[in-house]
């Protein structure tokens, strides 16, 4: 493939297009991350605990069975340490 890049403008152009797509997506990702930060800042300003909110977002993204297993293990560990 490297030889194709030096011998052919076609492969080089394809590489350039792929890099440019990645760059555009990275920029979109940054914009979305900034939007998410703004929502958390708004929530914090309204008195919500953003750390708890982040935990809830992570938990909701998991399948129910995985979430239940994680919670059961956490509860077991808390009991072992005398926290529950």
Image (cartoon, rainbow, N blue to C red):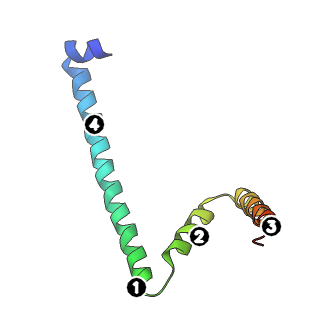
Instruction: State which quadrant residue 44 falls in.
Output: bottom left
Instruction: State which quadrant residue 41 falls in.
Output: bottom left
Q: What separation in Å lies between label 1 and label 2 (alpha carbons)?
A: 18 Å
Q: Nearer the viewer, mark 2 or mark 4?
A: 2
Q: What separation in Å lies between label 1 and label 3 (alpha carbons)?
A: 35 Å
Q: What separation in Å lies between label 2 and label 4 (alpha carbons)?
A: 35 Å
Residue drawn at the location 52% of the way across and 68% of the way down:
54
Q: What separation in Å lies between label 4 and label 3 (alpha carbons)?
A: 51 Å
Q: Nearer the viewer, mark 1 or mark 4?
A: 1
Residue drawn at the location 59% of the way across and 61% of the way down:
61
Residue 25: give its label: none
Residue 45: give its label: 1
**Residue at disc 1, secondary structure:** helix
Image height of 67 relative to 10, above or below: below
Mark 2 highlights which residue?
A: 56
> Residue 5 appears at what percent x and percent y?
24, 18
Residue drawn at the location 57% of the way across and 63% of the way down:
58
Residue 19: give its label: 4
């Amino acid at each position: 493939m490297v030889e194709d890049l030096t011998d052919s403008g076609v492969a080089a152009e394809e590489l350039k297009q792929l890099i440019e797509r990645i760059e555009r997506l990275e920029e979109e990702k940054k914009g979305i991350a900034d939007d998410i930060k703004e929502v958390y800042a708004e929530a914090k300003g309204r008195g919500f605990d953003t750390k708890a909110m982040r935990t809830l977002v992570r938990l909701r993204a998991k399948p129910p069975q995985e979430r239940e297993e994680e919670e059961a293990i956490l509860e077991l560990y808390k009991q072992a340490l005398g926290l529950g």
